[in-house]
Image (cartoon, rainbow, N blue to C red):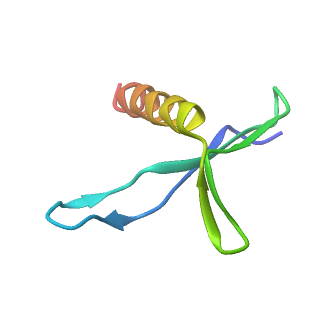
């Protein structure tokens, strides 16, 4: 089993700095693989509620990584 995994996308919005928004989370122990953003043919799909969860988890994970 692997450790939990998150993927981030390096983005630069107009008039903003660089950002690393999360878009993927995987946890083999729980059998979870979630995409909060993806491409569907020509469309870019965002699952807003899941994206917010990914952001919250990444923030918590980042805070505990420094301790």
Q: Residue drawn at (53%, 29%), measured in percent from left and top?
A: 53
User: Is residue 13 placed above or below 20 in the rendered structure?
Assistant: below
Q: Residue drawn at (67%, 37%), measured in percent from left and top?
A: 4
Instruction: From the viewer's perspective, tell me whether residue 12 is left or right of residue 28.
Output: left
Q: From this viewpoint, which residue is outermost toward the front? A: 42
Percent from the top left, x then y, of residue 16? 17, 60
Percent from the top left, x then y, of residue 62? 39, 34
User: Is residue 12 placed above or below 61 in the rendered structure?
Assistant: below
Instruction: From the viewer's perspective, tell me whether residue 33 is left or right of residue 20.
Output: right
Quarter of the rendering occupied by the N terminus:
top right
User: Is residue 54 placed above or below 60 in the rendered structure?
Assistant: below
Quarter of the rendering occupied by the C terminus:
top left
- Of residues 47 and 55, the one drawn nearer to the viewer in this rendering: 47
Instruction: From the viewer's perspective, tell me whether residue 49 is left or right of residue 39.
Output: left
Corner quadrant of residue 64 = top left
Percent from the top left, x then y, of residue 65? 41, 32
Q: Residue drawn at (53%, 38%), measured in percent from left and top?
A: 48
- Of residues 38 and 55, the one drawn nearer to the viewer in this rendering: 38
Q: From this viewpoint, which residue is outermost toward the left? A: 15
Q: How many labels does the image show?
A: 0
Corner quadrant of residue 34 = top right
Percent from the top left, x then y, of residue 3? 69, 39
Instruction: From the viewer's perspective, tell me whether residue 8 is left or right of residue 10.
Output: right
């Amino acid at each position: 089993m692997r450790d939990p995994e998150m993927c981030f996308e390096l983005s630069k919005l107009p008039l903003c700095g660089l950002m690393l928004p999360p878009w993927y989370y995987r946890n083999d122990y729980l059998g979870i693989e979630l995409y909060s953003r993806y491409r569907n043919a020509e469309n870019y799909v965002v699952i807003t509620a899941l994206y917010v969860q990914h952001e919250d988890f990444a923030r918590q994970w980042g805070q505990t990584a420094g301790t």
